[in-house]
Amino acid sequence: MKARRVQIVYNAKAYIARGEFREALRIEDGRIIRTGSGRELLDAAPAGAEKLDAQGCLVLPAFHDSHLHLRWLGQRAGMIECAGASSVEEIIRRGRDLVARLKPPAGTWIQGAGVNPDLFTGEKRDPSRDDLDRVSGEHPLILSRHCGHTIYCNSPALKTAGISESAPEMEGGTIEKDELGRPTGVLRENANALIRDRIPPPGKAEALSCVRLAAEKALSLGITAAGSYDTLSPDPDETAGVYRALCGGGRRIRVTMQCGISGREDILDACLGRGLVTGKILYEEPAAGPLLKMGPIKLFIDGTLGSHTAWMRRPYRDRGETSGFPVLDLESLEGFIRKADAGKLQTLVHAIGDAGMDAVITAFEKIAGGLPGPERNPLRHGIIHCQITDPELLERMARGRILALVQPVFLAEDMYILEKRVGPELAATSYAWGAMNRLGVAVSYGTDAPVSDLNPLLNISWAVLRQNPADGFPEGGFYPAERVDLADAIDAYTAGSAWPGFDEQRLGRIRPGFLADLVFIDRDLFSIPARDIHRARVIRTMLAGETVWEGPGSG
């Protein structure tokens, strides 16, 4: 009979719940068995027990990012990195540098990501095909806006996709043209597929390399679990195969697959036909527990605030000719949710604008709102982003027990444009994490990485401060009534993010019976000024009692 593996973590400040901490933990075969004082647990430790001195670290349940893109995050390493660029000219320079460094053969696709014209220091405009032709005229090239909902293409990319002056209008997307009718190279929402479908999909080896890079980054930041939306092909088994290879190859991170169907019923049917119901375990190990599970399908109802494609009830304040638009018709939205629900598949829907929020809430109310309050929405359908809201929308979410998967770090960029887009009255009730908590909405935190920085401590800082931690702007916080306190922010990143994946009985808390997924942090977040939260460092990350990442100073 195999001997138990017993570990004692001591000299810690382990966060149990609001206002409750312990000095030590006893872990047996990857699960927490007891919490208590160091003396108590060390004295009771059996011979041969492993003893780990936490050196006074704050020990939290490991972070759980409720929505990101691991493959895309790893893929960014080989792309033109546009995040932080202050102008179109700087993007051109970065692109030329990458082409000179990698020397890709003519005709090879070049990609980039992270463009944000709203943060340019000079002219705040989208890059055009003429700009990107200066990077290369021999390679089809596309750059993604930081949100991923707008792309910028050079002439070879447009030619490869057959996009010319005769390109028609399309539902749920736009191909922008100049005054002469010539495509500018700017494509939004559903039009993106005209280009993206021409790019050769990554092979399994390339995809696996990307997710390994991303997993290593996540573990270094204390993240041991993620809801990851990665579409490699219409075949859900292909994506699952990459993650089985990741977990089986020794990189221990828990992945809940969020299967994007992009309005395609055949992909939904493929999931249902393979029995991929939400919560189905696709890979596990005896000591570590489930490492890969089927999660929800993911739909989109609208675009983004930065691109003016989030679907609003009223025209944008700074672009009165548009209110954004739905990227999926409402009959299809309801049909997809209803079919998934009948097949025991959870649905998460990207919604940012208040009209988009209303449409999704209405669909969920029709399909999952008929049961008594405590039993309502048993599959835990939810909304990703939930940015532009008013009190009535949030109250309906609370009544319908509809989940909110939010990204506080989005304010790092959006606070500079929010009032310009929607006006101060609606801005005051948006990004309303405090109101969600007060109403009892089930809230989880994530980053949508690589759309935003993956670091949970930076994300928590934005939730608590609602201001730039580097310079304290704006003084007093951006609509400070919607700030949350530190305990609420940590809970949303741990127990709150376990909830959408039905993991609340094994992940997200330090308590007996739970898996020992832990993160050790070099300073006590509960004692330092909130403006210093983002400066804290992860020292150690554990998954089921195994150290899966260790940094300098961990001892």
Image (cartoon, grey):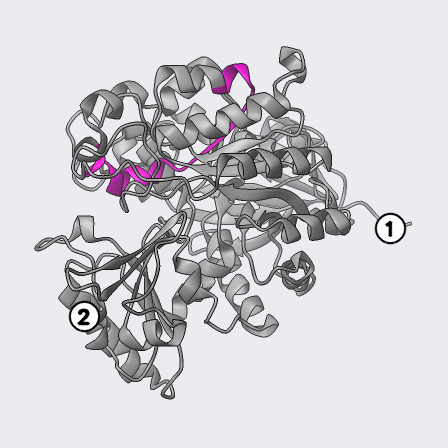
* Label 2: element kind: helix
> Which residue lies under the disc numbered 1?
2
Residue 446 inside the magenta-drawn segment: no
* Label 1: element kind: loop
The residue lying at 61 percent from left, 71 percent from top is 204
Where 82 falls versus 502 (above or below)? below
Where 471 falls versus 367 (above or below)? below
Report crowding for label 2: few under 14, some 14 to 19, many 20 or more residues within 10 A (C-alpha). many
When asked about the image quadrant of residue 206, the answer is: bottom right
- Residue farthest right in this picture: 1
The residue lying at 16 percent from left, 39 percent from top is 471
Viewer-closest of 247 and 120: 120
Position of residue 19 measured from the top left corner of the image (x, y, whole percent): 47, 18
Position of residue 12 measured from the top left corner of the image (x, y, whole percent): 51, 35
Left or right: where 388 falls relative to 444: left
Marks 1, 2: nearer the viewer: 2
Viewer-closest of 419 and 223: 419
When asked about the image quadrant of residue 193, the answer is: bottom left
How many numbered dots are placed on residues in this image? 2
Which badge, 1 or 2, is on the more N-terminal residue? 1
Q: CA distance from mark 1 to mark 2?
A: 65 Å
> Which residue lies under the disc numbered 2?
131
Q: Tag on residue 383?
A: none
Q: Which residues are magenta?
A: 397-418
Q: Tell me the amino acid under the disc marked 1.
A: Lys
The answer, for residue 318, to whether it is visible in the render is: yes
When asked about the image quadrant of residue 295, the answer is: top right
Viewer-closest of 250 and 399: 399
Position of residue 350 measured from the top left corner of the image (x, y, whole percent): 46, 39
Left or right: where 39 falls relative to 316: right
Q: Tell me the amino acid under the disc marked 2.
A: Asp
